[in-house]
Image (spheres, rainbow, N blue to C red):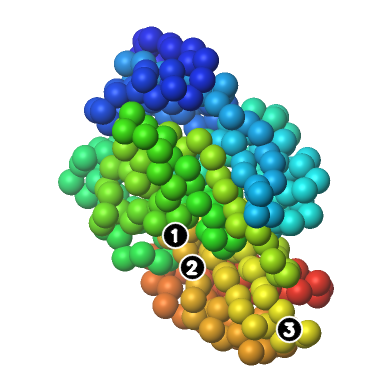
Amino acid sequence: MKSFAYVDAANEQEAIAALGTQRGRILPIAGGMDLVGLMKDYVAQPDRVVNVKRLDRTIAATPDGGLRIGAAATLIELVEHAGAARAYPALVQAAAEVGTPQIRHAGTVGGNVAQRPRCWYFRNEEFQCLKKGGPRCFAVDGENQLHAIFGDGPCHIVHASSLAVPILAYGGTFRVAGPSGERDVAAADFFQMPDENLMGENVLRPNELVTHVTLPPPGRVRSATCEIRFKQSHDWPLALATAILTMSGETVRGARIVMGAVAPVPWRAQAAEAALTGQAVTEATAGAAADAAVRDAKPMSGNAYKVQIARTAVKRAILKAAGLPTV
């Protein structure tokens, strides 16, 4: 990889001061699960990397009964946090499915949320694709088995983060810090489609960092995440879904359903939510909601199979959240 300078930031203020305004020249590194691979493949070629592992990594309840997660917390710390598992099971389930035990011990919450796309054209230095400033998205006419079935391009990546899906479903917010101060960004506004931000996937400026994730009080809901992979060992999901159900007895009074690995951003399935609201959860009603979730899918030449897989992920997430069998 290209040689680079290394800044070992002792705290948030030092980390922000070490970053710069030019995209790609100075990059943060925590667990390095994503950035090191990008650097080895010459997709990322920073002049300087800034260690952000000393940022806040605490996971603690907020005064109103929510949860505040430091971005430097490792995935395994989130998985093993009893309070998080009790109040936000869909988030902990997603974290438990990421990578391997070694990756979960090193990878961080902030790193998982902000990781770059896994598109093989983007990751290959031989292809100057649209997302790297090139003339076109090679997936349109090329190998697109793992690409988006929602979103209409012009870049057909799928969002790589597993944690982003339940964070959006729970209505979480991100604390973003930079040289101009801090701001809270709702998860619904944090992630950006390629037609909004072709060179990135979120609202972060080059000199800003995600420092915390805050989840509101869960309330009386039932929630679950379901992930489907090609293989059960280390692999990225072909599709995943989080379902959060507000119940009145056995009737769904409100639902939030978000899909992952199917679009350039975590994809809210509002049609599925509407189909489920007012219904008791059964295999039939979960299936009808799952049908609604994928009704507007537009698969590419090689990934029509993902429509059925995404449907299955949504159906299983709903049934799992309701405490019903998923087989």
Residue 140 pos. (x, y %): 30, 57
Q: Amino acid at mark 1?
A: Ala
Query: Can you say whether 297 is above or below 282 in the image?
Result: above
Q: Amino acid at mark 2?
A: Arg
- Label 1 to label 3: alpha-carbon separation: 26 Å
- Label 2 to label 1: alpha-carbon separation: 9 Å
Residue on which the image places disc 2: 268
In the image, 155: left or right of 172?
left
- Label 3 to label 2: alpha-carbon separation: 23 Å
Q: If you read the primary sequence from the N terminus, does the residue marked by circle 2 or circle 1 appear first?
A: 1
Mark sitting on residue 188: 1
Mark sitting on residue 101: none
Q: Considering the image in quadrants, where does the N terminus appear?
A: top left
Residue on which the image places disc 3: 248
Q: Tag 2: Cα neighbours inside 10 Å, few (<14), some, or many (≥20)?
A: many
Q: Amino acid at mark 3?
A: Ser
In the image, 305: left or right of 321?
left
Q: Tag 3: Cα neighbours inside 10 Å, few (<14), some, or many (≥20)?
A: few
| Residue 264 shows in this picture | no
Query: Can you say whether 318 is above or below 3 in the image?
Result: below
